[in-house]
Amino acid sequence: MAREPAARQEGEVAGGGDSSSESGSCSASCSGDSDELEPEWLNSVQKNGELFYLELSEDEGETLLQDSSSEVSAVNHVRFRENEAEVIQEGSQKERKYEPRLKKFTKIFKKKNLLPKQSGKKGTGGGNGHSSGPTSILKHQSTQKGGVTIQQRYKDVCVYVNPKRLPNAGAGEKVKLLEALVGIVHQSSWSSRKAGDQNRNNKGNNEEKLVVHGLVPGSSAIKTGQILIGDALIAVNDVDVNAENIERVLSCIPGPMQVTLTFETSVFEHEGTSQQRYKQAQSIMNNLVKLLWGEDNMDLQLAIQGMPHIVMYLTLKLDSETSKDEQEILYHYPISEASQKLKSVRGIFLTLCDMLENVTGAHIISSSLFLCGKLVQVVYCKESDKLLVIGLPAESVPLSQLRNMITDVVRTLRFMYGSLDSAFCQVENISCLDHFFNLFFQRAIQPARLNSNASPSVQQYDNCSALLLDNLPAVRWLTLPEEIKMEIDTALSDLEAVDFAELSEDYYDMRRLYIILGSCLFYKGYLIGNHLPKEDLIDIALYSRHYCLLPLAAEQRIGQLVIWREVFPHHHLEPSEASDVTVYREPEARYFLLIVGLRHFMLCVLLEAGGCTSKAIGNPGPDCIYVDQVKATILHLEGVESSIEERLESPSVPCLSCADWFLPASRDKLESFTAPPILSKLQNKIATSPTSKRTLFSDSSLRTRKPSPSRNSGGSDNGSEGPEEGGGLNPLATLDQVQKHERKESQGSRGSEGSGSLFKVNKKKQILPNPFHLGNLKKSLSEKDMELCNAIKLTSGPENTLFHYISLETMQGIFITPTHKEVQQLSGSIHPQLIKNFHRCCLSIRSIFQQTIMKEKKKNSDSGSNSESRKASSDFNLVREHGVLFECSPDNWIDQKKTPPTMAYWVVGRLFLHPKPREFYVCFHDSVTEVAVELAFKLSFGLAT
Amino acid sequence: MGEDEGSITLLCLTASSGVPLFCRSRGTPSKHQLPFSVIGSLNGVHMFGANLDVLLAATCTANTRVAWRVFHNSITLIVLSSEEGASDFTLGRLLDNAFSTMVLILGLEELVNVRNIERLKKDLRACYKLIDSFLGPLEKTGDLTQCVECVPVPHGPVLQECLEAFAGAAESRFGCLLAGGRLALATDPWWQLAPQELLLLTWLVGVLPPHTTRDYPVYLPHGSPTVPHRLLTCQLLPGLEVCLLCGPSPGLPTVESELVPRFWKPLLEPLQACVRPPPPGAVLPPGVLAFLLVNGEQRSSLSSVQPPGSRGEAPLQEPFQAGFPHRAQHCYVVSATHKAYAIHAPQHQLFLLLAPNVPTFALRPLATRALQRLTEDAAC
């Protein structure tokens, strides 16, 4: 490949600062310093190829480490791998055949790194120091920080071992007794490096310590609950053990017996209390990170312990042969007292599920139970003869929301494992699922504790919106100026082309491993670039949401995040019913998800193997080249970070105003610095008489524009500007006013565009045919005056009465809502309440819309056989728009004599089904005239680009 | 499964022994009678949960809702509904009303201490008519609002005076005048009855077999669930009945032959006007298809459905629970074929059903005006 993209060079810089750039001339450098280039995450790759590697940037990692007591945070991501690293078995032959060759040419990685599973055994001898890549927590832990001392303590743990129950060893495979018998996972290579460090600091003996790197689920070691990851096993029945002799010692156990294991625990202690304050500030953030690392965070656990919540996977088929206890439970979590009660009534769920399906012919959806005086909602999902049950208290999650949540859970699990059966019925998944549902319940019951935001107002915004936004089938989208978008799109396209030099097919005369189906880029949790079909985007978004990756990237600079796993996007695996010969068929392929996070960026890539690429065999781990290439793309995009940041800081289009400005109490205060004369005018008008409303309309500064030559990028929906049917408006009385005023205002308001003009330009070309009531208005407008035209909208200005909005583009899988920054700027006493109320109300409205959509679907599916009258009656429930007027008054009203001033505002949601489904929710002041309300909806067409 | 109209089934069992007492249903005949095994397991799951301190309250499938309720540890009521508008709320109301009906007719004592199940079964037959009326499609708004339906009467003060005098002469404080199954006038103590009692008494008179006079023993579910009172009704004109709640005296013949002619004969003309009162919706702006006005203090409601064939109020399942920091005042819904608007004023609640051609922005002024007019002239 003659092409030498800039991205590639940067990629190499990231990879370790290798100087030579021509891929052919490598042989010299590949042997020498390659150890330095070994990526940190390689050792975290699990046996099944999965990887979840998270590392904070230097400063954050430090604070976290200093916080963590008793447990060593660094080793905790080991929990993600349940089994020891082993040589890949059959099927790896082919892989091995070409991988060395690849390695040879890429010169970045050593052979053992390309086959990460082997590194576990082989790497022991190396002991060649640590890499000079980005600092990882690993190193923080081993090289001791000044403020921390390590105390060694010893503890004895009794475990029951039974050598007779050992699984039969495969041919030629050596059983690790420590793991098979006791259930302790120890990885020699991994600790050898660490031990080397420790030796330098401590004593200097050469025996490798048996550090617990993981515990086998269901083993006797994990059952004791006393053995922690990070402990070092030093004696068995008072016989000193180390890595050398442990297998020998254990093999001496003749039969089932109790053995005493002696462990050395490391306890970190703070020397001073100076960090105490710092710690406080960081503690919330740590909750999330700790959770992600799979640490058992007692704090968080205890907080939700009293809440009855449960997830169970039950089977309806009873196998009387097996005499296992509780055989109908295939999986359940958590094991707490409150959940125990729910577990004990599983018979109810099974019976109801089976019986009601027989009686009513429809699948079961939900149940309500009273438990210890609390209303608990239970939702079901049935897959063949298995039943997934999730129960949560109604006070945390309303039922309609819970129904969405189980759909999301099921979708995510199917995305991760292919089907519920394969997720729950395989023993090795259990610890992963525990972690998954731990996160799920933490998010559902106490989202506040997981939110890592520094600013309280933003945090509050997060909390109140979490319930709604987390369950939208969409991702938060950030509108960006065109140039930046271009740049991002170009970078993503370059990546997706997969023609980086190392992977040129011609060059090596072999097929590449993967092709990239698409990618999407997040910045601080906002989606800023997407090259994925909607279904895939949602799948990935749900996955990231479940693992809280988006908030993580929003607040903390991720040092490095690498996630790799095989995924099962149902969009690709289950093609649509129309299985024509002519229709494109998805190839029989396997799919992999690669997520790389760097600082505030997170790039998710969906890879396909087996279509036009070589078939994936076994459980391939992440391929370094792909990871590096993705990383390089992010680094390449760092140039636009400042412009994105600028966009986040700048006031948005449309502008928002704060509810508190509309209360006279705060007006005086406000006038002193912002002096909004129009505001006071506004209030006077509200006070005087309801008829003055019409004149108010002029204040809201409507503006029309000449039609810009509309180069509709989509090209699809243009040209249907004709008369539209709608129940809508006949506001001729007001129209004259509007027009008159528009002429007047158009001069003045043009100046107020300010920095936002870029976005407006952006919007202009997106003028869509108007699918709703405004159609009439537009028509009459154009009849009367051809100059007046399409883009009517509420513009910015202090007299703006728009408080908040959410625009959900169901088709594209994105939603747009004011950024955190914008909300943060609008602080006040009432406004946060208003925001909270808005989200709560949207939740209700949305659940009504969901019913509508469901009915619509049903109607469409059986429309042929229905009579007209029946249709009419069911149409009644097809809600298109829902609005609620709220009234509020300040909380702390001191003046006892006067009644507190009130402010009224609307929360209105609208559902559009044509041309494409979308939902739009706005919150605005009562004084907005009804026509302006229509205009607010018009906004929704400008928002999405 | 095409659930054309939807069906609804109410099951009544004894809580301790699980013996079915009755089963009332409406809707598609195929589901008319649930097999006993289904009834048994429906009761069984609830009982099993109760033993473990887990109270099963409701369950829903894609097309059916089921609700359970145990009253006084002796009677279990289970309802299955596949109606489209059914919600946990409406089913809860239904169960509550059904049990109160049983108390109204049989008294609480007999229901709590069941001595002879066979006799109880027979006695419960008396409740069927009233209970069946709950299962019917929503004709009465009282089901939903728990407010008695009223009808405005011309010459109100004159009739009110007469009613008070009539009740006084019959040694009773509780008296009311019913026109066409709705409450036209009532003495103050009558209004003091619990809203549910008001409702049930009104409905009871409606479903009793037509007679010119009746003397019917009733227990008041909230006021006196164990001591029966006498409900006396006399038909003044077709569709117009006067009711009294009284103790052992006076006898029905006295009331019928002495008191009624004495008090009501002179007022024949105003009474005739009561039978066919002018539709209250006449004053309303065009576009209003139906309205429902609820007086929150008096727990009374006034409603009207103007065009035939309209389905009445939208089954709005507003899940407004706690959790809203601010108070909702107005609310509207635009659906494919109708529009609806609701106002929550301090004293009244007004629900309007409007034609789809009424512009959305005009809903609010229209509704405010309607509320003003209705509260001005309505007796409610």
Image: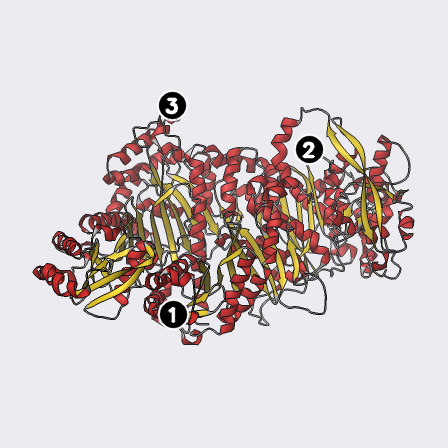
Instruction: Residue B235: give x, y in percent of width and height.
Output: 17, 66
Chain under numbered label 3: A
Chain under numbered label 1: B
Mark 3 on the same chain as mark 2: yes
Please say if A912 is above or below A62.
below
Query: Element at badge 2?
Result: helix
Identify which residue is drawn at 33% across, 61% down.
B104
Give the distance between the C-alpha atoms of the residues marked 1 and 3, in whole angstroms. 64 Å
Identify which residue is drawn at 67% across, 26% down.
A275
Please say if A851 is above or below A302.
below
Q: Which residue is mark 3?
A: A672
Q: Nearer the viewer, residue B234 or A752?
A: B234
The answer to whether residue A254 is visible is yes
Instruction: Residue A293: give x, y in percent of width and height.
Output: 69, 43
Q: Amino acid at mark 3?
A: Ser
Q: Amino acid at mark 2?
A: Asp
3 or 2: tag closer to the N-terminus: 2
Q: Which residue is mark 1?
A: B5
Dot 2 alpha-carbon crowd within 10 angstroms: few under 14, some 14 to 19, many 20 or more: many
Instruction: Residue A473: give x, y in percent of width and height.
Output: 52, 53
Q: Which label sits in the foreground, 1 or 3?
A: 1
Dot 3 alpha-carbon crowd within 10 angstroms: few under 14, some 14 to 19, many 20 or more: few
